[in-house]
């Protein structure tokens, strides 16, 4: 059984994330005040993707000029600052992994989603 909201008889619907965000934002109640806390946990991947590279020509330069200042700012406001980073790490049976399989070249498609689901093997 497949969830009707996500698939059509097992074929997963695809769309742009921005389409979903605009719909979901109409149902969200965003807080107006920042909560009082001693700890902040930041999604490193989301942080990197939210920043615009200014003059950086390398990833190292981008991190030093853009990412570190944000983390340093957080570290000055909170007693503990954690940055969680799982760049390009996807569970083998995730929607992201299935999407990646669909866009790969045919000769690279040696692993299929069905194999993961039936044997439990990782990519």
Image (cartoon, rainbow, N blue to C red):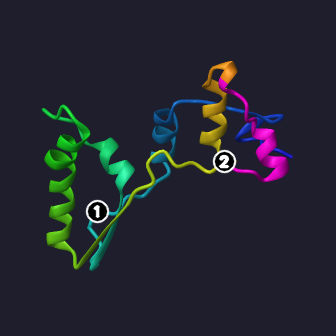
Compared with 35, 88 (above or below) is above
Residue in the image at 57% along x and 48% along y: 90
On the rendered structure, is 85 left or right of 66? Answer: right
Q: Which residue is mark 2?
A: 92
Label 1: which secondary element? loop
User: How many marks on residues?
Assistant: 2
Looking at the image, residue 76 lies above or below residue 93: below
Q: Is residue 38 left or right of residue 13?
A: left
The image position of residue 103, as x and y in percent, is 61, 24
| Residue 15 counted in the magenta span | no
- Horizontal side, residue 78 vs residue 123: left or right: left
Residue 11 found in image quarter: top right
Which segment did they paint magenta? 108-123
Q: Which numbered mark, 1 or 2, is in the foreground of this view?
A: 2
Tell me the quadrant of the picture where the C terminus can be found: top right
What residue sits right under mark 1 in the picture?
Answer: 32
Residue at the (63%, 30%) spot, across then down: 14
Which quadrant of the figure has residue 83?
bottom left
Q: Is residue 95 left or right of residue 33?
A: right
Indicate whether residue 112 is drawn in magenta. yes
Q: Position of residue 38 (x, y in %)?
A: 27, 80
Q: What residue sits 19% from the left and 69% below the top?
A: 75
Residue that protrudes farthest toward the top in the picture: 106
């Amino acid at each position: 059984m497949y969830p009707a909201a996500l698939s059509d008889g097992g074929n997963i619907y695809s769309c742009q994330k921005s389409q979903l965000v605009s719909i979901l934002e109409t149902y969200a109640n965003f807080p107006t005040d920042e909560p009082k806390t001693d700890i902040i946990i930041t999604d490193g991947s989301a942080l990197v993707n939210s920043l615009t590279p200014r003059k950086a020509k390398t990833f190292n330069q981008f991190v030093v000029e853009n990412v570190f200042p944000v983390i340093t700012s957080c570290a000055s406001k909170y007693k503990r600052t954690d940055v969680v980073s799982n760049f390009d790490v996807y569970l083998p049976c995730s929607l992201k992994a299935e999407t990646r399989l669909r866009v790969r070249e045919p000769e690279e498609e040696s692993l299929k989603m069905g194999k993961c689901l039936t044997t439990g093997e990782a990519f």
